[in-house]
Image: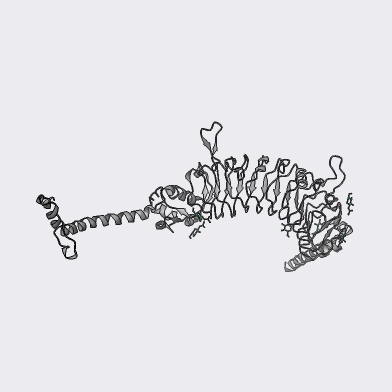
Amino acid sequence: MSVRRIFVIAVIGLIGVYADDVKDANKTIAKNPEWKETGICRKCVCKDEKIDCFDQSISKFFTKQEWTDVSEFKPKTIDLSENSFTNVTAIAQLPVQVLNLSRCSIEFIENASFKELQSMSVLDLSHNKLTSAKLSPHAFEGRYSPEEYEPLASMRKLSLAYNDLHSLNQDLFEHLPELTELDLSGNPLTTIDHVTVIAISSLPMLKVLRMRSCQLPDIPDKFLHTPRYLERLDLSDNKLTSVPVELEETKNLLYLNLNQNPIIELDVNNEDRPGFPRLRKLQELHMCNMPQLKRIGAGALAGLESVERLHMSYNPKLSFIDPKALARADDIGETYDWPLVKELYLQSNNLSEIDRRLLSRWDFLQKVDVSYNPYLCDCTTQWMVDMLVPIVERKTPNSTENMACQEPVEMRGYTMKHLHDIHRTMRCVDKYGHRPERDGAILLGTLIGVLLAVPIVFGLMMMWRHGYFAFCGLRGPVDVSRAFYKRAPADDNYI
Ligand SMILES: *[C@@H]1O[C@H](CO)[C@@H](O)[C@H](O)[C@H]1NC(C)=O
Ligand SMILES: *[C@@H]1O[C@H](CO)[C@@H](O)[C@H](O)[C@H]1NC(C)=O
Ligand SMILES: *[C@@H]1O[C@H](CO)[C@@H](O)[C@H](O)[C@H]1NC(C)=O
Ligand SMILES: *[C@@H]1O[C@H](CO)[C@@H](O)[C@H](O)[C@H]1NC(C)=O
Ligand SMILES: *[C@@H]1O[C@H](CO)[C@@H](O)[C@H](O)[C@H]1NC(C)=O
Ligand SMILES: *[C@@H]1O[C@H](CO)[C@@H](O)[C@H](O)[C@H]1NC(C)=O
């Protein structure tokens, strides 16, 4: 028995050793395929279909031969970001889908560098040193195609953000006919000139356009006319002083970001500072961190029929939002329609109240934050204490802690949550802006004063009549009546 057992164990052991050998053999084969020995995979990490060269101090772009050597690895992603080469040259045929050339000091891209990357859909060229003069449309040249002009047919997303582009060559995107996403943020465009308009107009499939921090004072006519499928537009941190009228062209816009623009006011009756045009599909609007914004007039947001997420926070001067800001008169002008807002953010503005008429259905809100405003706590905001506090409490717990009263002075520091909990009924401020809470005290004081004054004055009068103050030169009416009313002695007893 025991001998057989030992034998069995020995056999199992041998098999085990053999298996390990085979695995090891496989490992060595896997470890040293040809591409592992080449330049690129020695400098970078080649693993899981990705060539990762992030921050490897590469100062010269790889040659076409070096790229050819890794073709067997079949990379889908190449990350060359955070290196220091200045020129991009032609890459060999690879099944790459994502090419990241961000943060590399790139100044120049050779003609047709990406021609052989027929699967590339994402190209990140952000944070480089590309200039209008040096960035040529030929950089994006693809292979010959009978239908299109040497297209990079798979390209969908291109980022040119944070380069030094003042203007775009009007043909810049001629080889990128299917582009859906373009990021131009952080380029000193200053104004969108005629050729830039033409360049953007050559992108009929564009869905996402980012132009944050481009120093734009306005959006020219026809700029958004061609990209008729545009869904997301970021114009934040520019120099827009009014809501661009040109937005009217974006019939399919879902998302709009106007944060950090010096817009002062939205007023449908003011041509220079109009409200929004009709953006029938817009779902999400951002108007935050606007240092100048003071006022949003009646109907200024009425064009946003479908808006669901409204972000209007951190506008330190925003003191007035008209109760009808979102209300849209119906076709026959008899009633109003409101969008069904699901998320409302109005925190850290200068609002003294949230008007109940701003939304038609407060119960539709899924998220709401109206904290850090200098609220006036009187009868006009009673509804906030009674109705809005419980809604906010349900959707955004704890944010009611920061819905506090600023005025009147007597109410300062109270939170609306507290007033809700104690079922506080607040007084009305009169039309002269007098403070009811203080008025109460003044009224009581006056009343007490009057009540005390009557007997005192009466007493003094009686004493005076009876000549008690004669010693200080005040002669009582007793003498006077003697002089003037001699024949009316009964007067003395008129009481
Ligand atoms: C060795 O590699 C081959 C091919 O890659 C594979 O089919 C085989 O299962 C591997 N053997 C072991 C023991 O891992
Ligand atoms: C980059 O390309 C430009 C234009 O072809 C050329 O003048 C320059 O010498 C190149 N720089 C390097 C480092 O290869
Ligand atoms: C490219 O790399 C940068 C920095 O490493 C990163 O921030 C960026 O998200 C990457 N871009 C893409 C498209 O993955
Ligand atoms: C790029 O291609 C264009 C058009 O084919 C040509 O005029 C230009 O000289 C080329 N530039 C370089 C640097 O080869
Ligand atoms: C906030 O509003 C009050 C009056 O509603 C006004 O006196 C004050 O100047 C405003 N603050 C700012 C920063 O605009
Ligand atoms: C709200 O505040 C309480 C006590 O300060 C804390 O325990 C709780 O986690 C907070 N809830 C949320 C959602 O932040």
Nearest the eye: 465 or 341: 465
Q: Position of residue 378 (x, y in %)?
A: 41, 50
**Would residue 162 appear left or right of 342 to someone viewing this image?**
right
Residue located at (74% from left, 46% from top): 180
Q: Position of residue 324 (x, y in %)?
A: 52, 42
Residue located at (62% from left, 41% from top): 277
Nearest the eye: 381 or 296: 296
Q: Position of residue 351 (x, y in %)?
A: 50, 52
Look at the image and tell me whether residue 96 can be seen. Answer: yes
Q: Is residue 209 above or below residue 12?
A: above
**Would residue 339 appear left or right of 62 to someone viewing this image?**
left
**Would residue 13 appear left or right of 364 to someone viewing this image?**
right
For the N terminus, give its image quadrant.
bottom right
Nearest the eye: 327 or 435: 435
Look at the image and tell me whether residue 386 can be seen. Answer: no
Nearest the eye: 426 or 390: 426
Q: Position of residue 82 (x, y in %)?
A: 76, 62
Q: Is residue 178 above or below residue 348?
A: above
The residue at the far top in this view is: 332
Q: Is residue 250 above or below residue 60?
A: above
Q: On the image, which quarter does residue 187 sit in?
A: bottom right
